[in-house]
Image: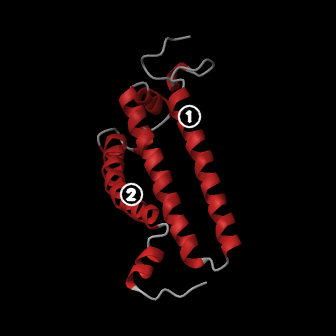
Amino acid sequence: MSIPTTTRDLRTKANVGGNFEKLAWIFMRLSGVVLLVLVTVHVYVNLVAGEGVHKVDFAFVAGKWANPFWQLWDFAILWLAVLHGTNGVRVIIADYSTRAPVRFWMTMLICSAAVMMLIAGTFTIFTFDPCPAGILSGNLPDFCPTP
């Protein structure tokens, strides 16, 4: 391994992987701001504008997710929150793990968990049936046909 001797050598060594880290840094700032807006509206609509936490049940979620707008809203929260959190943990792993193999496998573990959460969450949001069979009519939204 050679020791950089000129300013150009230092800049070249510093740019290795620099674009990804720069983009990850920008993503963290932008996604944090967008998440703040998305989650604030989410909490306001679900708890403040509604009838409080005691009214959030299957029928409430089913009625909300019957509208594609709210599906996309929750989808955006899911993806941004998981990617934001995964990137944050990736940075913590990079900062505190001293051995390269440990850093690699911990990063792979957190990325695998993120992929599984994104797949399961996306599947849940877009395949959710607001009117499933076998549910008591009092627990279903108003727009579901009565059994």
Q: Quadrant for residue 53, please give it.
A: top left
**Which SS class for mark 2?**
helix
Give the colour scheme of this rendering.
secondary structure
Residue carrying label 2? 27
Q: Nearer the viewer, mark 1 or mark 2?
A: 2
Which of the numbered marks, if any, corresponds to residue 22? Answer: none
Q: Give the x, y percent position of residue 55.
A: 42, 37
For marks 1 and 2, the one nearer the N-term is 2
Picture residue at 46% right of the left edge, 33% below the top: 61
Q: Which residue is found at the position 31% from the left and 45% from the top? A: 41
Q: Position of residue 127 (x, y in %)?
A: 55, 27
Residue 98 relative to residue 82: left or right: right
What is the quadrant of the N terminus in the image?
bottom right
**Nearer to me, 85 or 50:** 85
> Which residue is depicted at the point 49% across and 59% down?
85
Q: Position of residue 117 (x, y in %)?
A: 59, 46
- Label 2 near label 1: C-beta < 8 Å? no
Q: Nearer the viewer, residue 99 or 44?
A: 99
In the image, what residue type sits under mark 2? Phe
Q: Picture quarter containing residue 14?
A: bottom left
Up the image or down, 61 lies above or below 33; here it is above
Residue pictured at 32% horizontal, 40% vertical: 45
Residue under pointer 1: 124
